[in-house]
Image (spheres, rainbow, N blue to C red):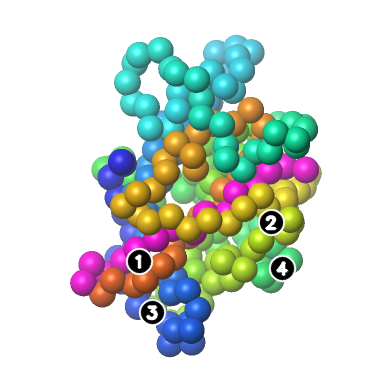
């Protein structure tokens, strides 16, 4: 299990208006998210070295120099779903999720000095982040989009993420002028201490996205939530 990723200095507290819903807070960069770095860096290296299949990338949890085993297939992929066409690499510029009224710009997320993924600025409640050296939304592989759900003072961009269901659609505007459209395959909650790294972050043979935030019960002792909410989606 990868080390827990860093979070903004400001500690979140549960919002009173969400006591009757699943208690979630702005994204605490949860155990398991760091493994995305290994997968996406290898993915980029494969592309730059020649026409290699994205399936050649090592699984997300691998950090060794041994030959890569067969990649783990995404659980969101259906055997009767034809592989979607993918788009070339381009930076995402805006995320639209009509069902939950999301219309948010992107910010690049980088790796800090400790090897952990930085969080988006906590003072902007309408902002999502993506790992800028990883797979871009619409590109072959697994792109990750993360955002806060609330802050110390108000709800934030992914406050309604738990409402997404199979078949719901969302889109990502890109710097090349194209729009990548996605359909939700599933929305699942995982305990942080049993997070399925390979299932969530493993490279895929087509273009997929994971929308990730925190969920579960807020543990005041550790100032963290117990679970992660992951929305699995594919390009259409």
Q: Looking at the rendered structure, which numbered label has been put on residue 99? A: 4
Alpha-carbon span between mark 3 and mark 2: 27 Å
Question: Picture quarter containing residue 216?
Answer: bottom left
Whichever of labels 3 and 2 marks the residue nearer the N terminus, that label is: 3
Q: Looking at the rendered structure, which numbered label has been put on residue 100? A: none
Residue 132 x/y as whole percent: 52, 41
| Element type at mark 1 | strand
Alpha-carbon span between mark 4 and mark 2: 12 Å
Whichever of labels 3 and 4 marks the residue nearer the N terminus, that label is: 3
Point out the residue furthest to the left here: 221
Whichever of labels 1 and 4 marks the residue nearer the N terminus, that label is: 4
Circle 2 residue:
166
Other residues around mark 2 within 10 Å, as few (<14) / some (14–19) / many (≥20): few
Indicate yes or no whether the magenta region holds residue 147: no
Which residue shows up at 28% across the image and 45% down it? 3
Question: Picture quarter containing residue 47?
Answer: top right
- Which residue is nearer to you in this view: 201 or 131? 201
- Compared to 110, does 151 lie above or below? below
| Element type at mark 2 | loop
Residue 196 x/y as whole percent: 42, 44
């Amino acid at each position: 299990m990868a080390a827990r990723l860093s979070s903004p200095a400001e500690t979140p507290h549960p919002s009173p208006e969400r006591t009757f819903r699943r208690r979630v807070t702005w994204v605490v960069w949860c155990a398991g998210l760091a493994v995305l770095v290994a997968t996406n860096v290898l993915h980029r290296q494969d592309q730059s070295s020649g026409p290699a299949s994205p399936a050649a990338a090592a699984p997300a949890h691998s950090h060794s120099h041994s030959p890569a085993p067969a990649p783990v297939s995404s659980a969101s992929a259906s055997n009767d779903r034809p592989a979607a066409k993918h788009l070339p690499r381009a930076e995402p510029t805006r995320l639209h999720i009509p069902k939950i009224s999301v219309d948010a710009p992107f910010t690049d997320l980088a790796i800090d000095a400790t090897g952990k993924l930085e969080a988006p600025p906590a003072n902007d409640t309408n902002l999502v982040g993506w790992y800028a050296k990883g797979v871009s939304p619409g590109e072959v592989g697994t792109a990750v989009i993360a955002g806060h759900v609330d802050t110390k003072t108000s709800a934030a961009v992914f406050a309604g993420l738990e409402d997404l269901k199979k078949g719901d659609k969302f889109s990502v505007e890109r710097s090349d002028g194209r729009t990548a459209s996605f359909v939700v395959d599933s929305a699942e909650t995982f305990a942080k201490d049993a997070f399925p790294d390979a299932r969530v972050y493993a490279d895929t043979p087509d273009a997929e996205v994971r929308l990730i935030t925190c969920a579960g019960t807020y543990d005041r002792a550790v100032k963290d939530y117990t679970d992660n909410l992951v929305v699995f989606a594919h390009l259409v």
